[in-house]
Image: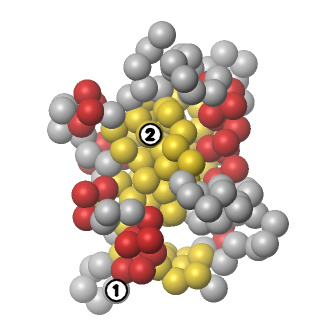
Amino acid sequence: MADPTWMLSLREADAGSDTDVVVNGTTGDIVEAVPGRQETATLLFSSPVDGEPAARQRFETARQLLEFAHTGARGRDDDGVPWYRERLPAAAPVDSQVVRLAPSVDVAAKSFRGVWAVVVGGQAANQTFSPRLQLDLFVLADEDDYADRSAVEDALGEVL
């Protein structure tokens, strides 16, 4: 069994708190992400993880983010500070497109850092043995800049 290497935190509809989805690995530019820029991360769901749902179930949970990824707006203010606006319908499977993508302690020790970002697009590769989810992310901040989702939303977001 492989150790998890990344954690994707999202807010499922009516959950009341964040859902953490274990990701077995990621590829793309997210390890050098800069707030205010759009980056792409490919999330890998392959290995079983003790105490966690199967890879397919973790993939399906994360894939919900793609359904309404196109419904918001984002940009940078005159000072270069990122902002976003969300407009999700009541039937959306998530309460927010804002996610936290953070490395495990072992990965963080290699100087990769987590980010807060808005999912703005992507695609799912629904492969039988190793599903992959490509997320197009507008990076809002480094993970350490905000204690939790509420702090990110209060500082940088607007829900329409």
Residue designated by label 1 = 77
Please provide percent x and percent y for residue 71.
Answer: 67, 72
Residue 5 showing in the rendered view? yes
- Choose between 21 and 69: the one closer to the eye: 21
User: Which residue is nearer to you in this view: 89 or 53?
Assistant: 53
Q: Which residue is mark 2?
A: 7
Q: Give neighbour class at mark 2: few <14, some 14-19, many 20+ (Cα, 10 Å).
A: many
- Residue 87's x, y, as percent? 66, 77
Q: Is residue 159 above or below residue 23?
A: below
* Visible residue check, residue 69: no
Q: What residue appears at the point 61 percent right and 20 percent down from the top-left corner?
A: 130
Amino acid at circle 1: Asp
Q: Secondary structure at mark 2?
A: strand
Q: Residue at x 39, y 71 (%)?
A: 152
Where's the C terminus, which quadrant? bottom right
The image quadrant of residue 17 is bottom right
Tell me, for residue 158, which label it has, or none.
none
Q: Residue at x 69, y 50 (%)?
A: 64
Residue in the image at 50% along x and 34% along y: 22
In the picture as drawn, the residue positioned furthest to the right comes out as 91
Q: Is residue 63 left or right of residue 42?
A: right
Apparent side of residue 65 relative to residue 48 in the rendered image (left or right): right
Residue 8 position within the rendered picture, expressed as x and y whole percent measured from the top left: 48, 44
Amino acid type at image mark 2: Met
- What is the x, y in percent for residue 129? 66, 16
Circle 1: element type: loop
Q: Nearer the viewer, mark 2 or mark 1?
A: 2
